[in-house]
Image (cartoon, rainbow, N blue to C red):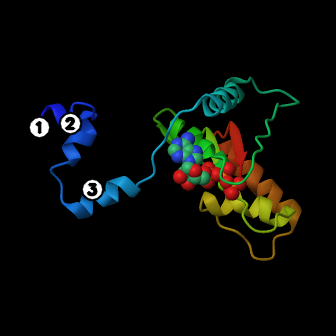
Amino acid sequence: MDDEISHLTPAAAALLAESDERRIRAIRSRRWVLYPRAKQALDRLSRLLDHPRGTRMPSVAIYGDSGMGKTMIMKKFRDEHPPSFSPMTGTLRTPVLAMEMTSRPGERRFYAEPLTLLGAPQRPRADIAQMEQAALRIMEAIGVQVLVID
Ligand SMILES: Nc1ncnc2c1ncn2[C@@H]1O[C@H](COP(=O)(O)OP(=O)(O)OP(=O)(O)O)[C@@H](O)[C@H]1O
Ligand SMILES: [Mg+2]
Protein backbone atom coordinates (compact mmCIF):
# COMPACT_ATOMS: atom_id res chain seq x y z
CA MET A 1 0.00 0.00 0.00
CA ASP A 2 2.78 2.36 1.00
CA ASP A 3 4.40 1.79 -2.37
CA GLU A 4 1.25 2.72 -4.24
CA ILE A 5 1.05 6.15 -2.68
CA SER A 6 4.72 7.00 -2.53
CA HIS A 7 4.36 9.23 -5.59
CA LEU A 8 1.76 11.43 -3.86
CA THR A 9 2.44 14.60 -1.91
CA PRO A 10 1.48 14.36 1.79
CA ALA A 11 -1.52 16.59 1.12
CA ALA A 12 -2.74 14.38 -1.73
CA ALA A 13 -2.13 11.19 0.27
CA ALA A 14 -4.14 12.58 3.17
CA LEU A 15 -7.11 13.01 0.83
CA LEU A 16 -7.28 9.25 0.14
CA ALA A 17 -9.00 8.62 3.43
CA GLU A 18 -11.67 11.25 2.74
CA SER A 19 -15.17 10.58 1.42
CA ASP A 20 -15.84 10.50 -2.35
CA GLU A 21 -17.65 13.80 -2.08
CA ARG A 22 -14.70 15.56 -0.47
CA ARG A 23 -12.20 14.05 -2.88
CA ILE A 24 -14.24 15.13 -5.90
CA ARG A 25 -14.49 18.59 -4.43
CA ALA A 26 -10.71 18.69 -3.95
CA ILE A 27 -10.13 17.58 -7.55
CA ARG A 28 -12.40 20.33 -8.85
CA SER A 29 -10.83 23.08 -6.79
CA ARG A 30 -8.70 25.78 -8.40
CA ARG A 31 -5.04 24.93 -8.48
CA TRP A 32 -2.02 26.75 -9.66
CA VAL A 33 0.65 25.28 -11.94
CA LEU A 34 3.75 27.40 -12.35
CA TYR A 35 4.96 27.20 -15.96
CA PRO A 36 7.86 29.29 -17.33
CA ARG A 37 5.75 31.92 -19.10
CA ALA A 38 3.58 32.46 -16.03
CA LYS A 39 6.68 32.87 -13.89
CA GLN A 40 8.00 35.42 -16.37
CA ALA A 41 4.72 37.34 -16.22
CA LEU A 42 4.63 37.24 -12.40
CA ASP A 43 8.24 38.43 -12.17
CA ARG A 44 7.45 41.25 -14.54
CA LEU A 45 4.43 42.27 -12.48
CA SER A 46 6.48 42.13 -9.26
CA ARG A 47 8.93 44.56 -10.75
CA LEU A 48 6.08 47.05 -11.15
CA LEU A 49 5.48 46.79 -7.42
CA ASP A 50 9.08 47.73 -6.69
CA HIS A 51 9.05 50.70 -9.00
CA PRO A 52 9.51 54.01 -7.21
CA ARG A 53 6.73 56.53 -7.64
CA GLY A 54 7.40 58.92 -10.50
CA THR A 55 5.72 60.98 -13.14
CA ARG A 56 5.56 58.33 -15.84
CA MET A 57 4.82 55.02 -14.22
CA PRO A 58 5.46 51.90 -16.28
CA SER A 59 2.73 49.52 -17.34
CA VAL A 60 2.61 46.02 -18.74
CA ALA A 61 0.14 44.48 -21.19
CA ILE A 62 -0.28 40.73 -21.10
CA TYR A 63 -2.09 39.30 -24.08
CA GLY A 64 -2.92 35.80 -25.16
CA ASP A 65 -5.74 33.70 -26.59
CA SER A 66 -8.75 32.85 -24.50
CA GLY A 67 -7.99 30.17 -21.95
CA MET A 68 -4.24 30.78 -21.94
CA GLY A 69 -4.23 31.65 -18.24
CA LYS A 70 -4.25 35.46 -18.08
CA THR A 71 -6.91 35.65 -15.38
CA MET A 72 -5.12 32.94 -13.39
CA ILE A 73 -1.89 34.98 -13.49
CA MET A 74 -3.74 38.08 -12.33
CA LYS A 75 -5.36 36.23 -9.43
CA LYS A 76 -2.06 34.65 -8.44
CA PHE A 77 -0.35 38.02 -8.45
CA ARG A 78 -3.12 39.52 -6.33
CA ASP A 79 -3.06 36.61 -3.88
CA GLU A 80 0.71 36.90 -3.51
CA HIS A 81 0.33 40.52 -2.43
CA PRO A 82 -2.74 40.53 -0.18
CA PRO A 83 -3.96 43.55 1.77
CA SER A 84 -2.23 43.97 5.10
CA PHE A 85 -3.13 45.90 8.18
CA SER A 86 -0.79 48.72 9.04
CA PRO A 87 -0.69 49.30 12.81
CA MET A 88 1.07 52.62 12.21
CA THR A 89 -1.83 54.23 10.40
CA GLY A 90 -4.56 51.85 11.50
CA THR A 91 -5.58 51.27 7.90
CA LEU A 92 -5.60 48.37 5.48
CA ARG A 93 -2.94 48.66 2.83
CA THR A 94 -3.81 47.10 -0.54
CA PRO A 95 -0.72 46.98 -2.76
CA VAL A 96 -2.46 45.25 -5.66
CA LEU A 97 -5.95 46.19 -6.73
CA ALA A 98 -7.26 43.77 -9.34
CA MET A 99 -10.41 44.56 -11.26
CA GLU A 100 -12.29 42.66 -13.93
CA MET A 101 -13.89 44.63 -16.72
CA THR A 102 -16.08 41.97 -18.23
CA SER A 103 -18.76 43.81 -20.15
CA ARG A 104 -18.32 46.92 -22.27
CA PRO A 105 -15.55 49.08 -20.89
CA GLY A 106 -16.17 52.79 -20.52
CA GLU A 107 -14.82 55.65 -18.47
CA ARG A 108 -17.73 55.61 -16.03
CA ARG A 109 -17.50 51.87 -15.47
CA PHE A 110 -13.73 52.13 -15.20
CA TYR A 111 -13.94 54.49 -12.24
CA ALA A 112 -17.01 52.85 -10.73
CA GLU A 113 -15.25 49.49 -10.59
CA PRO A 114 -12.58 50.27 -7.97
CA LEU A 115 -15.15 52.17 -5.91
CA THR A 116 -17.49 49.18 -5.95
CA LEU A 117 -14.62 46.79 -5.29
CA LEU A 118 -13.61 48.76 -2.21
CA GLY A 119 -17.16 49.27 -1.02
CA ALA A 120 -16.91 53.03 -1.33
CA PRO A 121 -20.15 55.00 -1.26
CA GLN A 122 -21.12 56.37 -4.66
CA ARG A 123 -23.38 59.21 -5.52
CA PRO A 124 -25.79 58.06 -8.21
CA ARG A 125 -25.56 61.38 -10.06
CA ALA A 126 -21.81 61.82 -9.80
CA ASP A 127 -20.20 62.86 -13.07
CA ILE A 128 -17.12 61.19 -14.46
CA ALA A 129 -14.74 63.83 -13.08
CA GLN A 130 -16.11 63.33 -9.56
CA MET A 131 -15.89 59.56 -9.90
CA GLU A 132 -12.31 59.86 -11.13
CA GLN A 133 -11.41 62.03 -8.13
CA ALA A 134 -13.06 59.63 -5.71
CA ALA A 135 -11.34 56.60 -7.27
CA LEU A 136 -7.92 58.25 -7.20
CA ARG A 137 -8.37 59.47 -3.66
CA ILE A 138 -9.41 56.10 -2.31
CA MET A 139 -6.62 54.28 -4.14
CA GLU A 140 -4.11 56.69 -2.69
CA ALA A 141 -5.58 56.28 0.78
CA ILE A 142 -5.24 52.50 0.80
CA GLY A 143 -1.79 52.54 -0.76
CA VAL A 144 -2.50 50.90 -4.12
CA GLN A 145 0.78 50.41 -5.98
CA VAL A 146 -0.36 48.35 -8.93
CA LEU A 147 -3.76 48.41 -10.60
CA VAL A 148 -4.45 45.23 -12.57
CA ILE A 149 -7.22 45.31 -15.16
CA ASP A 150 -8.49 42.06 -16.65
N1 LIG B 1 -1.27 28.48 -14.06
C1 LIG B 1 -2.31 27.66 -14.14
N2 LIG B 1 -2.42 26.61 -13.31
C2 LIG B 1 -3.48 25.77 -13.37
N3 LIG B 1 -4.49 25.90 -14.23
C3 LIG B 1 -4.45 26.94 -15.10
C4 LIG B 1 -3.37 27.86 -15.10
N4 LIG B 1 -3.59 28.81 -16.05
C5 LIG B 1 -4.76 28.44 -16.62
N5 LIG B 1 -5.30 27.34 -16.06
C6 LIG B 1 -6.57 26.66 -16.42
O1 LIG B 1 -7.04 27.24 -17.63
C7 LIG B 1 -8.31 27.86 -17.44
C8 LIG B 1 -8.39 29.14 -18.23
O2 LIG B 1 -7.48 30.10 -17.71
P1 LIG B 1 -7.85 31.66 -17.61
O3 LIG B 1 -9.27 31.81 -17.22
O4 LIG B 1 -6.83 32.29 -16.74
O5 LIG B 1 -7.64 32.09 -19.12
P2 LIG B 1 -7.72 33.55 -19.76
O6 LIG B 1 -6.44 33.76 -20.53
O7 LIG B 1 -8.04 34.54 -18.71
O8 LIG B 1 -8.91 33.41 -20.79
P3 LIG B 1 -9.93 34.56 -21.32
O9 LIG B 1 -9.14 35.41 -22.27
O10 LIG B 1 -11.02 33.80 -21.98
O11 LIG B 1 -10.40 35.32 -20.11
C9 LIG B 1 -8.42 28.07 -15.93
O12 LIG B 1 -9.76 28.07 -15.49
C10 LIG B 1 -7.63 26.92 -15.36
O13 LIG B 1 -8.45 25.77 -15.27
MG1 LIG C 1 -9.69 35.73 -18.40
Q: CA distance from mark 1 to mark 3?
A: 19 Å
Q: Amino acid at mark 2?
A: Ile
Q: What residue is drawn where x is 71% and y is 61%? A: 113
Residue that numbered label 3 is attached to: 23
Q: CA distance from mark 3 to mark 2?
A: 15 Å
Of the pair 88 and 52, the residue shown nearer to us? 52
How packed mark 2 is, by other alpha carbons closer than 10 Å (few <14, some 14-19, many 20 or more), is few
Q: Quadrant of ligand 2?
A: bottom right
Closest to the camera, between mark 3 and mark 2, is 2
Residue that numbered label 2 is attached to: 5
Of the pair 82 and 72, the residue shown nearer to us? 72
Rendered location of residue 78, percent (x, y): 57, 42
Rendered location of residue 97, percent (x, y): 64, 46
Residue that numbered label 1 is attached to: 1
Identify the secondary structure beneath mark 2. helix
Residue 51 drawn above or below residue 111: above
How packed mark 1 is, by other alpha carbons closer than 10 Å (few <14, some 14-19, many 20 or more), is few
Q: Amino acid at mark 3?
A: Arg
